[in-house]
Image (tube, grey):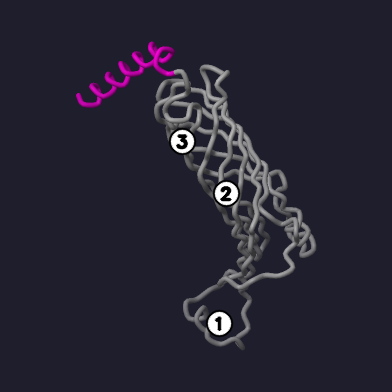
Amino acid sequence: MYKKIILSTLILLSSVVYGQSGQFFDAPFGGGIGYVPAWYVPNIDPINSQLKEIEMSELSSSGFYSSGIAGFLYVGFVKNLRVGGMGYGGSLSTSDENREVVYNLGGGGVTLEYTLPFIKDLGVSVGAAIGAGNLELDMYRNSGEFTWESTWEELSDPNIPSESYNRKLENSFWMITPTINLDYPIYRFISLRLGFGYQFTFADKWTADNGQPVSNIPSDLNSNSFFIQSGIFIGFFSF
């Protein structure tokens, strides 16, 4: 019964708002939150050069899938301006019989966007995300045979030979990401998104394992990346 009442109320509210939106809303209004999958294409040539030298298969240079969450809200005191937030993460990997290299990229930040006022019935917004992120490169080599006791023996005695190798390189960075997004409401409470952008990174720092500095990192190994994104949002939308 409660579900029917809530559903009926939402439908009624949607009909009223839709019929009066031209009278009351002379600018985009509302907000929502949703799932935002994307495809990132960073430069991984420096990594693939090293993989080729050690005779491992290369990481895909065509990019990788990322999962993300984003949300926004139009601020009433500035027409067509919406503020929000976003976060994403994804990875690439390659492996052979006893070795593996995993590339992980993720980040998040605050979004500021301006919806173009001369386009009606959908939201075409230009803006940027400002935030921070992390690039992590994990490298493994082992025989695949482990015991509880040998793990602690390897840690306590550096003279014990080990076939197991693990190295983690991390790059923390700040980012500014210009974007263009198109949001199309298929219903007053559901909207679809298609967009793209470019992630510019700066003030990055590389460390290894437990925070030790790393030197001689290739200058073109960074998290700058073009991306295409889509999304589905739930909220209230009046464009």
Q: Nearer the viewer, residue 126 or 33?
A: 126
> What percent of the width, then of the height, locates residue 141?
64, 69
Task: Report x, y in % for residue 104.
Answer: 60, 55
Query: What are the residue bounds of the magenta stretch?
Result: 1-25
* N-term-proximal mark, 2 vs 3: 3
Residue 65 forms part of the magenta stretch: no
Marks 1 and 2, the one that precedes in the sequence: 2
Disc 1 to disc 2, C-alpha distance: 32 Å
Q: Disc 1 vs disc 2: which is toward the camera? A: 2
Q: Nearer the viewer, residue 185 or 26?
A: 26
Report the amino acid beneath label 3. Phe
Q: Badge 2 is on which residue? A: 90
Q: CA distance from mark 2 to mark 3?
A: 22 Å
Q: Quadrant of the N terminus?
A: top left
Tell me the SS state at disc 1.
helix
Task: List the residue tagged with mark 1.
Answer: 154
Disc 2 residue type?
A: Gly
- Furthest residue to the left? 1
The label shown at residue 111 is: none
Q: Is residue 165 above or below residue 70?
A: below
* Label 2: element kind: strand
Picture coordinates of residue 20, whole percent (x, y): 38, 12
Query: Badge 3 is on which residue?
Result: 72
The number of discs equals: 3
